[in-house]
Image: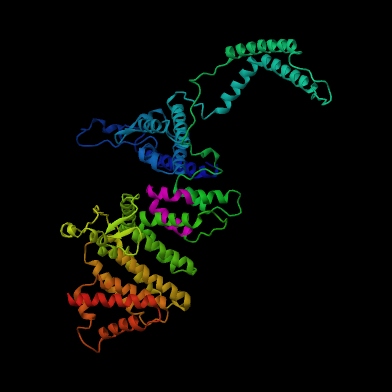
Amino acid sequence: MHVLDKIVPICLARLLASACSANKDYIESQGGVKEYGSSLDESDEDQDSTNSVEPKLDPTGGFLPLVISVASVWSEEVFITRTDAMQQQYVTEFLLQSLKGGVLEQNDIGHEHSGSSLASTLVQGITLRLEVSRAESIRIDGMLIAEAMSSIIGQSIRFDELHPSDEGQERVEGDRAKYGVVQKNSERKRTKTKKHRAKKKPMTLDPDAEYVSDAEDSFDSGDVSSHGDSLESDGSSSCSSNSSWSEDSLEPYVMDDDEEDLRRVRRPRSLRECFAYLIENENETLAYDKHEAALMELPAMVSSRPLDLVDMTPTLVRILLHMEDKFNMENFVQMKMDSLMAFAVHAPIETCLHLVNEIGEDVSLGTRLEALTVLGGMAQELSGLSELRNRQELQSKQRESQLPNNVDEIAMSSKLQRSLNLYNNPNVSSRSNDLEESPQSTSNVSKTRRWRRPRTTTITVTNRFGPIAAQMMYSLFAFISRTKSEESIWGGPLGEKFLSEFLRTLSIMLDCSRTYPGNSVHVMAQDLFELAWSFHDAQSSEVRYAVLAAMGTSISLVPVEFLMRVGHFIGEGDISSEWISFLEKCGFSDPDTDCRALALMIIGTIAETDHN
C-alpha cells in the first residue's frame, strides 16, 4: 500500500480516538463515572441494587466497542476470501493505528464487550490469515496485527517475513566470518586456472606432414589414458564425497504450470483491478498487456459473481462498450463481446438499463448496434436457446458418427430417397430394382417395411429470461417513446438501419420469452405488433423486413381474440382490411425477395388460424 493510501485509515482512527477521549472527559466533568465499573456516586453504594442500575463508562470513551466491531468484520472468513485486498489493507491500517495509538491498554484488550473481547476476535482473524494457502498480502496483514497486539499484552512476537533485511544481514555477516578463508582460497584457484587457460594456444595441423599411425603412438596414448583414468577416478570420488544430490532432492517438473512468473503484468484478481487495467493510458509501456489481461480474465471473474458485481457493472460495461482496438490486439472483438455477455448474463437488469441509456447518448451507429447485439444475445443465452441449439448439434453429430461408413451401397425405397433428397445419389440403390429379380419375395418385404425414426433424448432447459423479459422489453419501448422526435437517432439512412435492428432485437426478446408461463407474453406481443405496424409504410426494405418479422413473431403469441379483432372477420373499412392488404401487397409486389417470402408465410399462418 502506498504511503498516501494509509492517510485515510490513520486519520480516521486518530479522530475517533480523540472524539471518544473528549467524550470521556466531558462525562467525568459532569460528575459521571471516574473509573470503569464504579458507581456514579460513592454515596449510592448503600442503596438497594434492585432499585437502581449502576451505569458504567468505558475507560476509552466508547472507542473500544468501535474497534471490536471493526475487528469482528476483519476476522470473518467471508471478508478474508471475498473482499478486495486493497480494502482489507485499509481495515488493517485502521486496526494497527488503533492498537499503536496508546488509547488501548492490556486490560481493555481482554475486556469482554457484547460477549466477545478484542483479544479473542483478533486472534481468530490472525489464525485465519496465517494459513499457508492465503495470499501474501493477507498473511502480512495478520502478522502486522499479531506484532502490534503482542506489544500491548507484554509479549514479543517477531516474524522473519516482515523483517527480512535484519536476518539477511546477520546471515551474510556470519557467512563471511565463517567461510572467509575458503572463499579467498577458491578465488585464488580460479585466478590460476584462468591464467593457465589463457596461456594455451590452438594447435595448427600441417597437411603435408608425415602420417603417424596409432600403433607407433600406442605407448604414449596408453600413458595418457591411464593418467586420465586416474584423474577421472579421483574426481568422481571427490564429487561423490562432497555432493548432496539424491533422488529425494530432485523435484518433478510441474506439467500444469500456468507460467504466471513469465507474465509482464500480474493477473487481475478483482473487478477493481480490471477497471484499473482497462483505464490505463495507451501511452504507458504495459498498456497493451494490462488491457489484454483484463479482457481475458473478466468473463471468468464475472461468472464467479463477486460481491461488488452489481456496483462495478455500470462502470465496466460503459468502458467495454466504448473501448477501441488501439493496439491491433488478437481476438479483441471476441474478448470484448465475451466480457459484455458475461455482464449481461450474470447482471442482466443492470446491464440492460445501462445499455439503453448509452444508446440514447451521442454515440456512433456502431456502438448502438453493438449494444443491441448484446441485448439480443443476452435474451438467447438466458432463455436457453443457445444451450438447446448446441445440444441439438452435438446430438446430430453423435447420430451421424453412429452411421456405417464402410458400406459402398445402401438399398432403400424410392419414397425414402425422395424424402431424404438422395434420389440421384449413386451410392444409394432403389429397393424396387432389387425386388424385380425376386418377385416372389415382394409381398413379404412390403409387409415388413417400416419407417424407422432415430431415438432421440428429450432436451430441456430452464428459461431464465422469462421473469425479466417484461422489464427489459418495456425499457426499450420507453426509450423509443422518449426519443421518437430526435432526428439524430432515427433520421436518415443511419436511423433506418438502427430502427430495423431495434425491431429485430424486440422480436428476439419476445421469441425468447414465449416458453415462460404467464400472461405477460401476450401483452408484450400485442404491444410489439402495434409498434411494428406504425412503421409498415417505410421506404427502406430493411425496415419493412423488420416490421414483418415483428408482426410474424407477435401473431404466433397473441390471443385468438386479438387476431379476430385485427383480422378480416370484421369487414372492410377499418384497420384490419388495411393490414391484410398490406400483407398481400408485400407478398406479391414487394421489390425485396425476403419481404415477399416473409409476408406470404404470415398470410399462411393467419389462414391456418382462421381455418382452425
Q: Is residue 399 magenta?
A: no
- Residue at 57 percent across and 16 percent down: it is 243
User: In the rendered image of this protein, does residue 344 appear above or below residue 301?
Assistant: below
**Viewer-proximal residue among 433 and 543:** 433
User: In the rendered image of this protein, does residue 596 appear above or below residue 16?
Assistant: below
Specify how the rendered protein is coloured.
rainbow
**Viewer-proximal residue among 34 and 338:** 338
Left/right of residue 85 with respect to residue 475 in the rendered view: right
* Most frequent secondary structure within the magenta stretch: helix
**Viewer-proximal residue among 146 and 542:** 542
- Residue at 48 percent across and 28 percent down: it is 252
Q: Give residue 188's quadrant in the image.
A: top right
Q: Give residue 542's quadrant in the image.
A: bottom left
Left/right of residue 275 with respect to residue 117 in the rendered view: right
| Residue 451, visible in the rendered structure | yes
Residue 230, horizontal then vertical, whole percent: 66, 10
Q: Give residue 507's quadrant in the image.
A: bottom left
Q: Which residues are magenta?
A: 295-320
Q: State the residue lying farthest toward the right.
A: 208
| Residue 481, visible in the rendered structure | no
Left/right of residue 432 with respect to residue 97 in the rendered view: left
**Viewer-proximal residue among 200 and 505:** 200
Q: Is residue 299 magenta?
A: yes
Q: Number of marks in the image?
A: 0
Residue 420, horizontal then vertical, whole percent: 30, 62
Q: Point out the image quarter for the C terminus.
A: bottom left
Residue 541, horizontal then vertical, whole percent: 41, 78
- Residue at 23 percent across and 56 percent down: it is 453
Residue 599, horizontal then vertical, whole percent: 32, 77
